[in-house]
Image: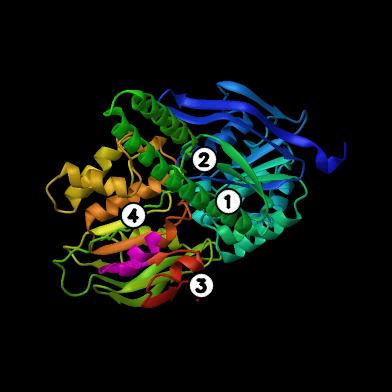
């Protein structure tokens, strides 16, 4: 068999569920050849990361079989570094990637950190993981997969937190990579650079369909198919109703007409079975508004000095930034310069050089969801956000806001920690709506978020009437938001 025709992954009628009330896959079949580069698409929470768990053996299917080519090696670049690994040194972190101890691992680390464009890598072997920025941790996650030189490379949201240079570097690497790559990502431009097919996970039917073509072509194909299915359903619904109406009319006339009525009912039932299950996972969050705190007059936040990282050292800088109501500031700078650290300090009124109006409510969207209690339920989280917003708790309103972010009744009692990263992001946005902040601080708010939701989020931020500070490495997203001032830490 020619090398490029070899099948490296095959799913045969695979079904998987976390519980009888939480099915993920139902009788799924597909195969991938050696060297394939494909994207996994699907709504937040549909099971994309679970699919990776099935491929790597973390999960075992309820039914069906998963075949991985004998001898093929796998490696996965996870979305986030587990909390119990944040205290490791870089050397310890990479050593955990191997089942057996690698005695001469430093040269391998240097080589792979060069690939992911992590500058200054020759000095970092003994550095603690948690001291790196979010963007640098994203590069370490990617490097932890690449250092294994796998036959099958699984990338889960690899562009999250990466700056433009980092994304371009990764894109070039994947275009040149000769082995099999499967990617979960919501960055359409990035995906279109190398994708040759899409595994489309339908969160309603629990099936996976394989589409060939680049990312943009596949999205067009799927959109056209959904429109066609909706049109067919509308035509069938009209025909079904007409037959039911006739059936009811004939049923009351007696005699042979009752038999005609019965046949019409049967025909209506047959037509109902022909109706296509509409893809519920293609829902987009509803348009929303983040209400701004109204009882604030004057300066909301003043920044006279701040700290940043230069040549791996913390340095202090002077500033003269004042934000009032309805003023939007974008903060820019390369990975590792200290943007996330600065945003965390801005959310803390005790920080030196930062003055926040004493009565202002600060709404902080953290890229690692550090403001969410992973042991708390979604219900308790949203209830607390509503109470912080100064409103009396009103359950119906809270559930209505939750529903607009696709947080359904079967999710609202779950713990935050069991949600997908995308669902955590939607909970964070729902919390901001209920909190009604006067100052909004957002650190990479598109990370993990389904691409369908991003224009809706951009419009909400564009319309926000309070003071806002935004960090984002996604130019198309930022372009949709009114920015009054830009602060570039790199300059």
Disc 1 versus disc 3: nearer the observer:
1
Disc 4 versus disc 1: nearer the observer:
4
Q: Name the quarter where the N terminus is drawn.
A: top right
Mark 4 and mark 3 lie on one chain; the one further toward the N terminus is 4
Q: Residue 488 in the image: state x and y as whole percent.
A: 46, 74
Label 4 and label 1: CA atoms lie apart by 27 Å
Number of other residues with Cα within 10 Å of mark 3, as a class: few under 14, some 14 to 19, many 20 or more: few
Q: Identify whether 404 is placed above or below 9.
A: below
Q: Which residue is mark 1?
A: 158
Disc 2 versus disc 1: nearer the observer:
2
Label 4 and label 3: CA atoms lie apart by 36 Å
Label 2 and label 1: CA atoms lie apart by 22 Å
Q: Residue furthest left?
A: 392
Q: Which residue is mark 3?
A: 490
Number of other residues with Cα within 10 Å of mark 2, as a class: few under 14, some 14 to 19, many 20 or more: many
Residue positioned 27% across, 64% down in the render = 439
Label 1 and label 3: CA atoms lie apart by 23 Å
In front here: 24 or 134? 24
Mark 3 and mark 2 lie on one chain; the one further toward the N terminus is 2
Q: Residue 393 in the image: state x and y as whole percent.
A: 14, 45
Label 3 and label 2: CA atoms lie apart by 42 Å
| Marks 4 & 3, CB-CB < 8 Å contact | no
Secondary structure found at label 2: loop
Q: Residue furthest right?
A: 1
Q: Residue 244 in the image: state x and y as whole percent.
A: 35, 35
Number of other residues with Cα within 10 Å of mark 1, as a class: few under 14, some 14 to 19, many 20 or more: many
Q: Which residue is mark 4?
A: 286
Mark 1 and mark 3 lie on one chain; the one further toward the N terminus is 1
Q: Identify the mark at residue 202; answer none if there is no mark.
A: 2
């Amino acid at each position: 068999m020619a090398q490029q025709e070899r099948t490296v992954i095959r799913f045969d009628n695979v079904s998987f569920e976390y519980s009888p009330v939480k099915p993920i896959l139902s009788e799924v079949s597909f195969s991938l050849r050696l060297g394939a580069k494909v994207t996994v698409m699907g709504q937040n929470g549909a099971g994309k990361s679970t699919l990776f768990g099935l491929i790597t053996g973390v999960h075992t299917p309820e039914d069906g079989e998963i075949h991985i080519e004998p001898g093929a090696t796998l490696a996965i670049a996870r979305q986030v570094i587990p909390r119990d690994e944040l205290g490791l040194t870089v050397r310890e972190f990479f050593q955990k990637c191997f089942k057996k101890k690698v005695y001469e691992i430093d040269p391998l680390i240097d080589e792979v950190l060069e690939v992911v464009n992590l500058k200054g890598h020759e000095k970092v072997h003994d550095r603690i993981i948690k001291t790196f920025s979010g963007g640098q941790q994203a590069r370490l996650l990617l490097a932890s997969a690449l250092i294994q030189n796998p036959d099958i490379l699984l990338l889960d949201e690899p562009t999250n937190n990466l700056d433009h240079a980092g994304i371009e570097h990764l894109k070039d690497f994947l275009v040149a990579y000769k082995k099999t790559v499967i990617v979960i990502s919501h960055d359409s431009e990035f995906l279109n650079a190398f994708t040759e097919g899409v595994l489309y996970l339908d969160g309603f039917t629990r099936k996976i369909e394989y589409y060939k073509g680049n990312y943009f072509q596949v999205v067009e194909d799927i959109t056209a198919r959904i429109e066609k299915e909706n049109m067919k359903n509308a035509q069938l619904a009209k025909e079904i109703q007409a037959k039911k109406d006739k059936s009811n009319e004939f049923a009351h006339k007696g005699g042979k007409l009752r038999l005609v009525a019965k046949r019409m009912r049967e025909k209506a039932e047959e037509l109902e079975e022909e109706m296509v299950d509409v893809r519920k996972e293609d829902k987009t969050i509803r348009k929303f508004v983040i209400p701004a705190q109204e009882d604030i007059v004057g300066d909301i936040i003043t920044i006279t000095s701040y700290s940043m990282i230069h040549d791996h050292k913390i340095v202090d800088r002077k500033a003269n930034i004042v934000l009032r109501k309805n003023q939007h500031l974008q903060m820019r700078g390369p990975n590792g310069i200290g943007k996330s650290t600065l945003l965390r300090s801005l959310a803390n009124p005790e920080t030196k050089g930062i003055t926040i109006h004493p009565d202002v409510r600060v709404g902080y969207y953290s890229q690692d969801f550090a403001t969410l209690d992973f042991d708390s339920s979604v219900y308790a989280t949203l209830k607390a956000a509503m109470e912080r917003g100064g409103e009396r708790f009103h359950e119906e309103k809270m559930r209505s806001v939750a529903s607009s972010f696709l947080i359904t009744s079967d999710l609202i009692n779950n713990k935050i920690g069991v949600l997908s990263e995308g669902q955590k992001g939607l909970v964070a946005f729902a919390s901001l709506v209920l909190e009604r902040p006067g100052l909004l601080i957002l650190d990479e708010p598109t990370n993990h978020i389904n691409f369908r939701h991003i224009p809706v989020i951009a419009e909400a931020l564009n319309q926000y009437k309070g003071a806002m500070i935004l960090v984002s490495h996604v130019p198309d997203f930022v372009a949709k938001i009114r920015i009054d001032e830009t602060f570039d830490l790199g300059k």
